[in-house]
Image (spheres, helix red, strand yellow):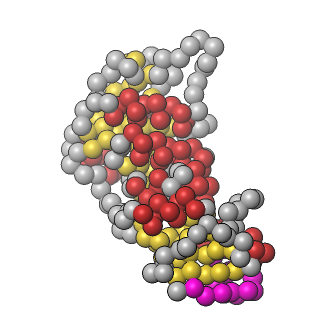
Amino acid sequence: MTKEITSSSNPLIKKLRALITTKKNRQESGRFIVEGWRGIKTLLEHDSPFYELEQIVVSNGWNGGTLPPHIETIKVPDHVFDKISDVRNAQGILGVVRKKAAPSRLPETGKFLLLDNLRDPGNLGTLIRSAVGSGFDGVLLYGDCVEPENPKVIRSTMGTFAFCPVWPISRDELSQGLENGYELCVTTGLGGENLYDAQFGAKTLLVIGSEAHGVSDELFQRAAKKITIPLQPACESLNAAIAGSICMFQIARG
């Protein structure tokens, strides 16, 4: 079903803009916006256990092909779409996505990325993408992390958000996971075991710290394993997303 809206003052247009600009609206509604064809195409072609595409909005200039009839489509003038969009050079299509129930605890086994106060949306999006690419089982948010439904995070995942559970984990929940046999593995610039020599079990929590401060003292002290990515002398450190990606692909090798 397709309907047209021509005014930027329409309540639905204001609601869509609020989902892009306001964390509170996303959290209260359980919905967020995905911009661009890649993310929408992913949700159309794959039955995500974590997200459902509820609505599609296209501009008059959209010429990407026929959209599915079973999802409501809203057509708006280009200038109205630009009022909604968070992208400078928008593709002219966005979707409203509903969050399904997220996992509430760690499963009996698995390899998970645990992000410790990670604040940069681009880094989180890239790490979600790498978690999917490497075969990790999900991403855990510890402390004051950037919101995973932030539009910049969603764009940075390049559509892979649909395949990756992301949820917050508390100190008590982490303690329970460690009691159940999960091994906390932190990255450190110096003094850790060489990543490429280390062995990892079926219950692994890989910790990547914040961009500014690295892994917190709390998690560093609780870690059962400390690993270091060997670097050439001219390179002092790596970006959080790059370091996490390298580690996940190595750990996933078994």
Left/right placement of residue 33 relative to residue 62 reads left
Provide residue 112's location: percent of width, then percent of height: 35, 43
Provide residue 83's location: percent of width, then percent of height: 75, 73
Q: Is residue 17 shown in magenta?
A: yes
Residue 73, by quadrant, is bottom right
Q: Is residue 99 visible?
A: no
Provide residue 101's location: percent of width, then percent of height: 36, 68
Residue at the far right: name it: 79
Task: Please say if 118 is above or below 5.
Answer: above
Task: Please say if 122 is above or below 248.
Answer: below
In the image, what residue occupies the spot 40% across and 33% down? 249
Residue 99, by quadrant, is bottom left
Residue 154, by quadrant, is bottom right
Q: Is residue 88 visible?
A: yes
Residue extent of the magenta highlight: 2-18
In the image, what residue occupies the spot 40% across and 35% down? 248
In the image, what residue occupies the spot 42% across and 31% down? 247
